[in-house]
């Protein structure tokens, strides 16, 4: 069995890198920082999906099955995700939709 972690970058379009220096930052703080970064692009971004690199956990879980792309990415893209925030080189990846009127 291959236990090597697969990079998600091959599936993501134009991810925005975000570095969080605080090694003690918890999920809520990391998510809030990703949200603030997304707000630089859209005034009211909507979080559609996220992925934790260390554990491989994704939300939503595998509900949209495709062989060529992870389910959480398929889910977010099918709902209009257009902002991807990559925190600390795939420690976390957040996908947002910018639904506000421009």
Image: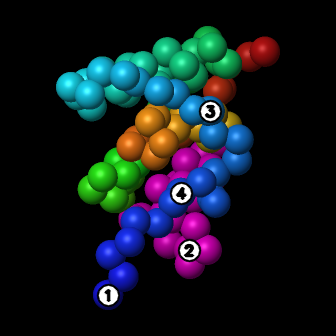
Q: Earlier in the sequence, mark 2 or mark 3?
A: 3
Rendered image coloring scheme: rainbow
Q: Earlier in the sequence, mark 1 or mark 4?
A: 1
Numbered disc in front, either 4 or 2: 4
Q: Earlier in the sequence, mark 1 or mark 2?
A: 1
Task: Name the mark on residue 66.
Answer: 2
- Please name the residue shown 61% across and 74% down the image: 68
Residue 42 forms part of the magenta stretch: no
Residue 2 in percent (x, y) is at 36, 82
Locate residue 62 relative to residue 79 in the image: left or right: left
Numbered disc in front, either 1 or 2: 1
Front-most of residues 67 and 22? 22
Q: Which residue is disc 3 drawn over?
A: 16
Q: Residues within 10 Å of mark 4 (few under 14, many from 20)?
A: some
Q: Earlier in the sequence, mark 4 or mark 2?
A: 4
Stretch in magenta: 62-80
Q: Which residue is disc 4 drawn over?
A: 8
Q: For the residue labelled by badge 1, is the local secondary structure a helix, a strand or a loop?
A: loop
Residue 73 in percent (x, y) is at 54, 55
Q: Residues within 10 Å of mark 2 (few under 14, many from 20)?
A: few
Look at the image and tell me whether residue 57 can be seen.
no
How far apart marks 1 and 4 lie (CA) works out to 19 Å
């Amino acid at each position: 069995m291959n236990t090597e972690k697969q990079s998600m970058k091959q599936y993501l379009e134009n991810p925005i890198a975000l570095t969080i220096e605080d090694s003690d930052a918890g999920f809520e703080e990391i998510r809030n920082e990703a949200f603030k970064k997304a707000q630089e692009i859209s005034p009211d971004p909507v979080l559609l999906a996220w992925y934790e690199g260390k554990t491989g956990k994704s939300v939503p879980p595998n509900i949209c099955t495709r062989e060529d792309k992870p389910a959480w990415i398929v889910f977010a893209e099918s709902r209009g995700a257009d902002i991807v925030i990559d925190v600390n080189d795939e420690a976390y990846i957040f996908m947002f939709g910018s639904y506000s009127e421009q």
